[in-house]
């Protein structure tokens, strides 16, 4: 695999309104002659909310429309998504659009809890309503810390999700840092999910964190890209910061990890020179496109790359 970087595609800078910083977790959906990308921006440092930008499908450097408000409001006090909403996967089916999102709730003791919700749009993806007030991927007796940031696929009527499952909170330099592996869940309808505590991609050590898998089928093989990091100094652009890894599968069940062939590396300078995180993948006409965030977890926005091999 080899990706050709195309640069920064969208920045929240000068967008005005409620967007103050960041365009995190680019989440694409092809809609006729436009490519819509949902993303999370921050009205203030302690909150994330989700909106979208539309690009011309024939020229992805051309912005057609920037939505000027969040598509889903924060949850009620005490709910799992009262402090943040970040997109993870978007699926269009039977005239409806399903948004799977990570809900954030500040906590006492550890910094936060985050689980996965699903919201549904009946107006073409401009506004969404929660399917339930609670999460669809949640804490279980076997997964006690988090269940978030899923890649959701529907394959021949069966729904599959790979998501970040919290493994621990480690005290690093006097601060608690979260770690997670990638686990698997399945569903008959995309709304009610079974979490069998099955690991998709395991950690290389207890201090590694894996998140935001992105999966595409090419030549009868499933290819997954994801972001991974260490726990010591990863926020400061060190060698522990997020970069992109890779795995493949023939059956969507067993995955072979090989980060060395991810086909994309940090740039020498610029917006993605210290960090690459939160990948997503889609087909746009005859190209396979990778979207991702760079330094400071997407403070500058998101960029793109095209699959060459």
Image: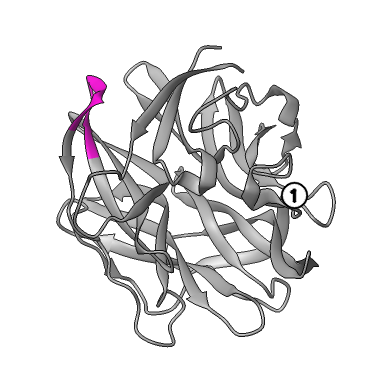
Farthest residue, direction right? 205
Q: Main secondary structure of the magenta part?
A: strand
120 left or right, relative to 278: left
Whether residue 154 can be seen here: yes
The vertical placement of 137 against 296, above or below, is below
Examine the rendered structure and indicate whether residue 53 appears above or below residue 141.
above
Q: Give residue 180's position: percent from left, percent from top.
A: 70, 58
Near-viewer residue (254 or 16): 16
Residue drawn at 67 percent across, 32 percent down: 248
For the C terminus, the image quarter is top right
The quarter of the picture where the N terminus appears is top right
Q: Which residue is mark 1?
A: 230
Range of residues picked out in magenta: 54-63
Rendered residue at 24%/63% (across/down): 128
Q: Residue at left 62%, top 66%? A: 195
Image coordinates for residue 140, horizontal then vertical, percent = 65, 76
Image quadrant assignment for residue 7: top left
Graded by Cα atoms within 10 Å as few (under 14), some (14 to 19) or many (20 or more), the crowding at tag 1 reads many
Is residue 221 left or right of 116 when viewed as pictured? Answer: right
């Amino acid at each position: 695999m080899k990706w050709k970087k195309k640069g920064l595609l969208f920045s929240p800078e000068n967008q005005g309104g409620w967007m103050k910083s960041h365009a995190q977790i680019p989440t694409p959906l092809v809609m006729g002659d436009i490519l819509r990308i949902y993303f999370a921006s921050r009205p203030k440092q302690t909150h994330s909310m989700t909106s979208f930008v539309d690009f011309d499908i024939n020229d992805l450097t051309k912005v057609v429309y920037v939505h000027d408000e969040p598509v889903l409001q924060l949850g009620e006090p005490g709910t799992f998504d009262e402090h943040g909403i970040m997109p993870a996967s978007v699926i269009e089916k039977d005239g409806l659009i399903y948004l799977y999102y990570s809900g954030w709730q500040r906590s006492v003791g550890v910094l936060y809890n985050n689980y996965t919700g699903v919201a549904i749009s009946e107006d073409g993806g401009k506004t969404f309503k929660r399917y339930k007030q609670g999460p669809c991927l949640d804490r279980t007796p076997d997964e006690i810390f988090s269940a978030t940031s899923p890649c959701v696929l529907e394959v021949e009527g069966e729904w599959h999700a790979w998501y970040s499952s919290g493994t621990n909170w480690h005290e690093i330099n006097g601060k608690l840092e979260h770690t997670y592996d990638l686990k698997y869940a399945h569903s008959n309808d995309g709304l009610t999910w079974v979490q069998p505590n099955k690991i998709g991609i395991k950690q290389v050590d207890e201090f590694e964190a894996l998140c935001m898998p992105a999966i595409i089928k090419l030549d009868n093989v499933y290819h997954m890209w994801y972001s991974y990091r260490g726990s010591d100094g990863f926020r400061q652009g060190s060698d522990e910061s997020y970069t992109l890894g890779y795995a493949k599968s023939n059956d969507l069940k067993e995955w072979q990890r090989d980060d060395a062939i991810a086909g994309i590396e940090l740039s020498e300078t610029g917006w993605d020179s210290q960090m690459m995180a939160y990948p997503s993948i889609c087909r746009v006409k005859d190209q396979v496109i990778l979207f991702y965030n760079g330094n400071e977890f997407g403070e500058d926005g998101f960029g793109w790359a095209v699959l060459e091999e």
